[in-house]
Amino acid sequence: MTILATILLLTSGICFIMGLKLLGRGDTARKGNRVSALGMLAAVLGTLVSIIDEQSASVFFSGGLDAPFVWILVGLLIGGAIGLPIARMVKMTAMPEMVALFNGTGGIASLLIGWGQLVASQTTASFGGADLSVTSFSAAAIFLAVLIGGVTFTGSLIAFGKLSGKIKSAPVLYLGQQIVNSVLIAALLACGVWLAVDSAETLPLYSAIVLSFVLGVSFVAPIGGGDMPVVISLLNAFSGIAACAAGFAVDNTLLIITGALVGASGLVLTRVMCLAMNRSLVNVLFSGFGSRATGTKQGAAERGEAKVISPEKAYYMLEAAQRVVIVPGYGMAVAQAQHAVKELATLLEANGCEVRFVVHPVAGRMPGHMNVLLAEADVPYEMLYQLEDVNPTMDSVDIAIVIGANDVVNPLAAEETSPIAGMPIVEVYRAKSVFTLKRSMAPGYAGIENPLFYLDNNSMILGDAKATIQALIAELKDDG
Amino acid sequence: MNFLTYAFLFLLAMFLGVELIRKVPAQLHTPLMSGSNAISGISLIGAIGVISTAGDSRLAMLLGGLAVAFAAINVVGGYVVTGRMLAMFKSGNAGAGK
């Protein structure tokens, strides 16, 4: 390896580390993203330079349209041509499923690397002076890259489907699911051992590919849509680990280090989110959360009727309010209501009212999902509060406006028998009045009845969140 | 390099990743996840490696090419999406200064 390649690859590693560090702070995050992108460029250039060093340039560029260089260039162009427009055009509200999809492409890439590496070593045992015959160790690494990459790929596709509403988000459960999964994993391990023992064989590889695809589906399908933030974060960690395994398979140090960085950061984020819900990762992944919840509830009849009011009535109460908190949830994202919400907050403040936004750590379909949307609508940081800042003062709040949030304000979390027991919530039920903006009376994503709706101080405003808020804005403007 | 060296590097990088992310504020979780997702497109260099060693194997060449394309989607899409998200946070800051 020449000095140039070494410098480029070292720079790349430093850029990724610095980039991640800078991404973790609000004022440096944009710089962090650019630094990390620069690292990626250095990584690609460094890899190309080192290849040209190791094999003679003539091999790399020769062969006309069939030269390795051409294959790389064409692959890069096709990938860029697909990724760029998608990333440019996607709406901010569709961000979670987009990240899931990109994550999936990273996973399948790792799988293809493992596969390609094995095929190459089987056909050309020695090429360009490098001995490519596969040791048991690299066969095991190839197997892991295929396994984790395949699970990440189909798992991400299912997550994408659930988040974008293309497939039903409810948990898919069937009898003997755990047994099927155990059999799948056992079969996969058998393939791994077989491949490590006899790496000239292709059958274990192909079986592993198919089985890993099936495992990805059966792993994510039983997890309800409400838990998708955790799943995406975990799959993100997987894609890092898959890249890392691919690094072991193709003997690439930078790939190992960077993959491990991503894997570790993804695992930390996953843990943070589980802590925010006060549930263990095992509970999130294997409980089929929400699927059995409806049966344990007493039913709405016992709780009385929910009070439904019109936006006009809500306006009269809002106009007199001194302290308002706004609790956004996934419904705000679906209705694309963030700009209207911001306008409402501005008008209320002009009316002499104190407005605070309370962002629950797991509101939405991605950690920090609400923050991104509120930032898009130009809601200043100063108006955003964590739930522990607002809950102690909740008694003095005149009106809490819940916009398309449900489980994060569900008082049932205080009851031990509840499936969401122990999850910290925004205690809006203690406010003097609560407005719940909701499309219908259906239970939330977790499928749990919400007693908040039947409390005396709660009023439902049914309908599209954006339309409701725009109606409120119109009333407030009329007044001014 | 031998297995032990790789294993050491792997473990150290894992610890580094944990330390880097541990104290990140909640509002940056989404951009951070999206940003680290873009970094996981590093499999791109592995894919390039596969093409360079594919030799006479058409299949390996094709698999490598596909891997490059998929990883490139991950890289390009990931960085652009993250950039768009973070651009919004910046305007949020500017709004606060008003």
Image (cartoon, rainbow, N blue to C red):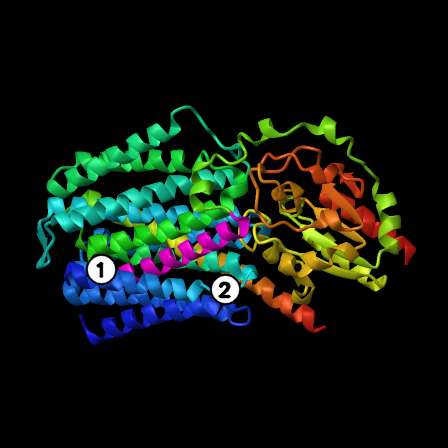
Disc number placed over residue A286 in the picture, else none? none
Pointer 1 and pointer 2 on the same chain: yes
Is-magenta flag for residue A275?
A: yes
Circle 1 residues within 10 Å: few <14, some 14–19, many ≥20? few
On the rendered structure, is A410 left or right of A133? right
Disc number placed over residue B7 in the picture, else none? 1
Q: Residue at x 51, y 58 (%)?
A: B29
On the rendered structure, is A358 left or right of A171? right
Q: Residue at x 64, y 40 (%)?
A: A412
Q: Nearer the viewer, residue A185 or B63?
A: A185
- Region in magenta: A253-278
Q: Can residue A40 be seen in this view?
A: no
Disc number placed over residue B24 in the picture, else none? 2
Q: Which residue is drawn at 43% across and 25% down?
A: A174
Report, in whole angstroms, how far the alpha carbon at label 1 lies from the one at label 2.
27 Å
Q: Looking at this view, name the residue that lies furthest to the right.
A: A479
Amino acid on which the number 1 mark rests in the picture: Ala
